[in-house]
Image (cartoon, grey):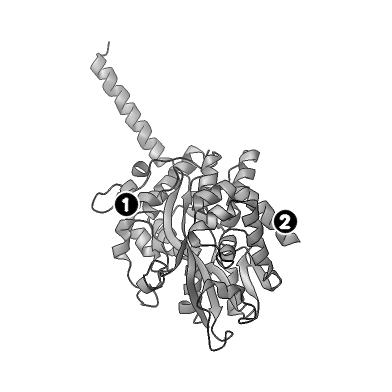
Amino acid sequence: MKSKLATLMCGAALAMTGVHAQAADMADSMTIVSWGGAYQKSQINAYAEPYKAMHPEVEVIWDESSNEAVAKLRAMNEAGNITWDLVDVVAADAIRLCDEGLAMEYDPDELLAPAPDGTPASEDFGDLIVSDCYIPQIVYSTTFGYRTDMVGDTPPTQICDVFDLEKYPGKRSLEKRPINNMEWALLCDGVAKEDVYDVLETEEGQAQALAKLDTIKDQVVWWSAGADTPQLLADGEVVMGSTYNGRLFSLIEEQDQPVAMLWDAQVFDLDGWIIPAGLPADRLARVKDFLKFATDTQRLADQAKYISYGPARKSSAPLVGKHAELGIDMGPHMPTDPANAQNTFLYNYTWWADYRDDLDAKFQAWLAQ
C-alpha cells in the first residue's frame, strides 16, 4: 500500500504532466481580425512575422472586419460558431463586447509579460486597461488630412474649416458612423469642449449635431475602412478627409503624396485586442502564447517603426526610434507630440459604449434621408 506522501507525489507528477501536455496542445492556426491597410501591415511586421519565425508551424489568417466586430461577434455567438481567435477593436467596442459576455475577461499580470525591469503589466499599461476584457495596444487619433494643392494659399488650420464649403470647396470624407462626427459638429456649432457629451446626451443635442452635419452632407463621401480616406486623398477625389493619423503618416511620408495633417481637435482613442469568449482550449492556448509575445515592451515599441501610433506600455515609449525604412525620427509624427497635441479632444469611450447602438440607428436613419 502506497504511503500518503507517495500518493500525493504521484498525483502531483500526473498533474504536472497534464499541464505540460496542455501547454503543448496549441492550435496550429489563428484567425486575427484587424483593420487592413498600413495599420495591419505594422502588426504583421512587428508581431506576426517575428512570432511565425519562432513558430513556423503556425498559420496566421487575417480578416479585415474590425469595423464590424460587434455585430459579427454577436452573430457568431448566436450561431454557436466562433471563427475568430483574436480581434483588434477600439475601446468603446471592447467595453460593449465585455458587457455582453462576448469577450473573455483576463488577468493582465497572468496573461501579459512584465516590463523588462519587472514592473507588472497592470502597472505598465496603467489606466489604459479600460475594461476587464481589453488588452490595449496603441494610442492613436482620428484627425484630418487635406490636399495641399487643392486648398489655395491659406491651408486649413482648425477643425471648423471642414464645415466651411465657401472657403474650402470640394468633397470631404467622413466615417460612416456617428462617433467623432457628432463631437466635431457640436464643437463647430459653438458647444464648449467640456460640454460636448452633456449636450450629446440629449435629443436636442443630437438633433443639433445632425443639423450641423446637414450643412456639408451633400459634399461628403462616407468611408468605412481606414484605408478609404488615404486613397480618396491620393486620387484627388476629396479635398480633405478624416482617418487615423497613422494612415495619413503612411500617405504623406511613405507615399510622398501632396497631403498635410490637420491636427486641430484630433480625437485621442485606444486600439487593442479582445479574445472572443468561448474559444476551444487549443485555440485559446495559441492566442495566449501569441499575445504574451505580441504585447511585450519591445514588440509594442517595434510597431512604432512602421506607423505613427504611440505604444500603450509606458516601458515601450523610450524605445521608440526611427522608421524602419525611411530612417526618420518617429517622435514628431506621434499624436502625443506637444506640437501636434495643442488642441486635442478626449474621446469618451465609456459614454459611447452606453449610447452607441441608439446613435448608430439614428445616424444611419439620417444618412438615408
Q: Residue at x 53, y 50 (%)?
A: 351
Name the residue type under label 1. Asp
Q: Residue furthest top?
A: 1
Name the residue type under label 2. Ala
Image spot of residue 52 (x, y percent): 42, 57
Q: Residue at x 26, y 54 (%)?
A: 116
* Quarter occupied by the N terminus: top left
The answer to whether residue 309 shows anywhere in this view is yes
The answer to whether residue 44 shows anywhere in this view is no
Q: Nearer the viewer, residue 257 or 360?
A: 360
Task: Examine the rendered structure and indicate whether residue 296 appears above or below residue 247.
Answer: above
Q: Residue at x 34, y 73 (%)?
A: 322
Q: Is residue 310 left or right of residue 228?
A: left
Q: Residues within 10 Å of mark 2 (few under 14, many from 20)?
A: few
Q: Residue at x 64, y 81 (%)?
A: 166
**Element type at marker 1?**
helix
- Residue assigned mark 2: 365
**Element type at marker 2?**
helix
Image spot of residue 89 (x, y percent): 51, 53
Image spot of residue 298 (x, y percent): 32, 59
> Residue 362 has which mark?
none
> Residue 124 has which mark?
1
Q: Is residue 100 left or right of residue 26?
A: right
Task: Examine the rendered structure and indicate whether residue 355 appears above or below residue 265.
Answer: above
* Quarter occupied by the C terminus: bottom right
Cβ–Cβ under 8 Å for marks 2 and 1: no
